[in-house]
Image (cartoon, rainbow, N blue to C red):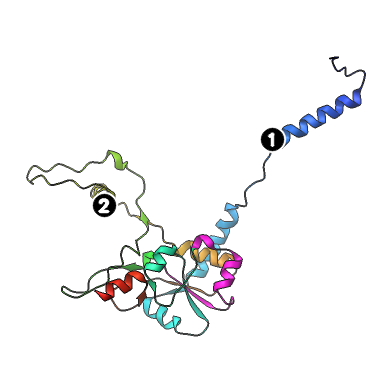
Amino acid sequence: MKSFKYTKNPFAYLAIVLLSMNSHSGFSQFAPSLVNFDAYQDLVSEVKEHRKTHLLNAEEFVATSKNEKVIILDTRSDSMYMAAHVKGAIHLNFSDFTQENLAKVIPSPDYKILIYCNNNFESKPLALNVSSLDLSPYFVTKQAFPPKFDVKKITKPKSKSKAKTKSKSGPSAIKDVIQENVPVDVKPITLALNIPTYINLYGYGYRNIYELSELVNTNSGKIEFEGTAVSIQLKK
């Protein structure tokens, strides 16, 4: 095979160089994702001011839900919604938020949208020997402690005065360890679904958003619940 000589055909040589450059750049370049952190940060700042005047306590939440052109929107997972949710709430999983999907469940932008999440509820018995709903498995509080310690390195202090008991294992044991070893001044960070739900609804163009701002005992009677878990417990 004869070697290619630049002096004999300079145009062919130039074409080969250009093709080589184009091929190399094709491998090194890529299309950026459709993620804009700065734009989202600007949206959060705008939503923060809007949200200040759109917070409702339980009484206001229930009263508003009875008006016309109002929906209660539950954006938790499908399984949690099916088990227990605020009576009358419709469902759209937060991960399924799109312009089209939101339009299917919200008749028009002028509707008031009432939102809530796990961090709005706790289940505590009202009194001894009184039947009560335990919905805590379906309204699990979302919070996290700052990672200032390594859970793996933490061990419970040994007590010589107490008799040996069977050690626990699993999530509950880890929770006990964390609670015993976290400094008193360290406060948990709440990771409530209400916040991203509110921000995204606003970003999709909805302005009549109202958020439940009260921590409600599921046995207080302030708000009614329904779902498969609720039905089973009520039958007992």
Magenta residues span 94-117
Residue at point 47%, 85% (across, down): 67
Residue at label 2? 172
Q: Please indicate whether residue 130 sits to the left or right of residue 73 in the image.
A: left
Residue at label 1? 27
Q: Please indicate whether residue 113 sits to the left or right of residue 63 in the image.
A: right
Q: Secondary structure at mark 1?
A: helix
* Badge 1 or badge 2: first in the primary sequence: 1
Which quarter shows the N terminus?
top right
Residue 161 seen in this snapshot: yes
Q: Position of residue 160 (x, y in %)?
A: 8, 42
Is residue 4 on the magenta stretch? no
Q: Is residue 148 above or below residue 37?
A: above
Tell me how far mark 1 sits from mark 2, CA to CA: 49 Å
Q: Is residue 16 above or below residue 93?
A: above
Q: Is residue 183 above or below residue 56?
A: above
Q: Position of residue 89 (x, y in %)?
A: 44, 74
